[in-house]
Image (tube, grey):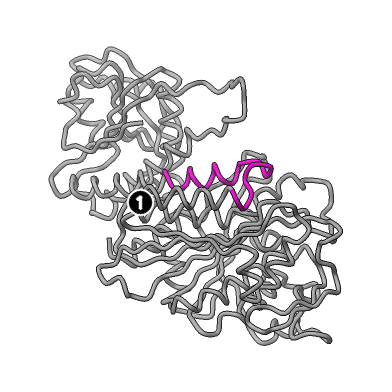
Amino acid sequence: MEFNVKISTVAKQHNTSSIVVAVFESQKLSSKAEELDTISNGYLTSLLSDGAIEGKIGQSLLLYNIPNVLSKRILLIGCGKKHEIDDIETYRKIIYAIISKLNDTASIEAALFLLEPDMSEDKVYWSIRQAIEAIHEALYDFNQFKNHTTKTKCVLQKITFNVSNKRELTTGMQAMQHGLAIAKGIKIAKDLGNMPPNICNSSYLTSLTNHLAETYRHHINTYTVDEKEMNALGMNAYIAVGSGSKNKSLMSIIEYKGHPDKTTNPIVLVGKGVTFDSGGISLKPEKNMHHMKYDMCGAASVYAVMNILADLQIPLNVIGILASCENMPGSSAYRPGDILTTMSGHTVEVLNTDAEGRLILCEALTYVKRFHPDIVIDIATLTGACVIALGDHMSGLLSNDDLLANELLKASGQANDPVWRLPITKAYHKQIDSNFADMANIGKGQAGAITAACFLARFTKKYHWAHLDIAGTAWDSKNNTGATGRPVSLLSQFLLNRSNL
């Protein structure tokens, strides 16, 4: 799909196959639609008076051979009440409806006139960026393992966003650049999440990071911590989780240096990458166990964000860590009742081998101290309890730093990738105390998303840290349509905000 931003008017669209303009509720035309109505001597107004379209969100009316209009078609798209188009979720629904209608009518090219004159730079930016992300979302399909596909091929090849002046053009070009990079990153995260676990294992993830370094050799370096080095470092909890699998546990490190001062303390992103989680000896129920290939979506999102950083050359220093392994039962698997000594020296009593994510993350969170991080954010499909608490709408956010938490909350609102902050207090910490070790790897049955974060918090006292529990948002468990790519948009926006781009 090709995207463009240009200064133009509806009257100058000569060879464009389709022009898209808005109609609001009560049959009120947008300013661009009014221009077309004037050019066509009231043709649109006459249709509205006949009740052809009411202007409700997602309604559409495709018109051919409009008097005095050079384009082949005009698509009137319902946008609801005028203020509703400012709501990102509503706006994305409108974009989905536009793409669906254009594809159904075999339009090859379309010019979108959804921006009103004299809009703020912020609105111009978000209108174009969100449209690009929404269009890629609407057209996404994971079919590389199908010999025969039934989905209709997209014939739409080019979308042009039309703006009114040079100021809007500059803003629009930046929005397009950001939108394309983030949409590409979301697709990368989705594709990785949707890959079958017999292919997407730790070695596969490592090969991807090495390829990333080859592609962006001036900005990215990578290296891998294997089981031999983990053993030397004392990362016994990490090794234990993967001990029942024939696939080796690996931790892939991606270093991106985009800041003018290469010595600036980095932002560190740590992604949980359990490429398949059977639960280990504490075996999961059979129902929906196939969804456990998505237990590496935290690592997938980190890998995707590192691609975005390199594509946009964002002036930050960022380290991405893919903490990957496979949690399987077997004669060598770790057991409930085991006590593990972590790299930090803390001991952990294993009460449930299905609470494995925190065991690999605690080692990674200890390892990152060597980077003297400015901040650390871990991303993990960590707890079913978070799904119970927040459903599939919001990711859980827990942090030891209010400023960092507020930054992430702001970015989540901007990116339409919502999170909700949960507390970490001493009362919750008590729930993971153990009679036989420094701590247990699960709490006492309540507030599981919080007690899991309390566990991680004990390894993050030396730096500012936030935890994103994406167990409910990383994939669509209701409709089984696959990985969602969250929270790539949130993390990208957070980094853009940090870089002032």
Q: Can you tell which quarter of the image residue 347 is in?
A: bottom right
Task: Name the spot of residue 343 as percent of width and height, x first.
Answer: 64, 78
Instruction: Write down the quadrant of residue 314 in the picture.
Output: bottom left
Viewer-nearest residue: 242 or 174 = 242
Looking at the image, residue 194 lies above or below residue 337:
above
Q: Quadrant of the N terminus?
A: top left
* Element type where label 1 sits in the image: loop
Q: Is residue 164 magenta?
A: no
Give whichever of 215, 77 is nearer the camera: 215
Number of on-image labels: 1
Label 1: how many Cα within 10 Å (few below 14, some 14–19, many 20+): some
The picture places residue 81, in percent across and down from the top left corner, at 39, 43
| Mark 1 residue type | Tyr
Q: Is residue 162 above or below residue 118?
A: above
Which stretch appears magenta? 184-203
Q: Residue at x 63, y 82 (%)?
A: 344
Q: Is residue 37 above or below residue 280?
A: above
The percent position of residue 329, horizontal first and vertical second, equals 82, 56
Q: Nearer the viewer, residue 206 or 33?
A: 206
| Magenta-colored segment: predominant secondary structure | helix
Task: Point out the image quarter for the C terminus.
Answer: bottom left
Residue at screen point 76% across, 84% down: 433
User: Is 13 left, or right, of 75 in this rendering?
Assistant: left
Farthest-out residue, top: 65
Label 1, on which residue? 216
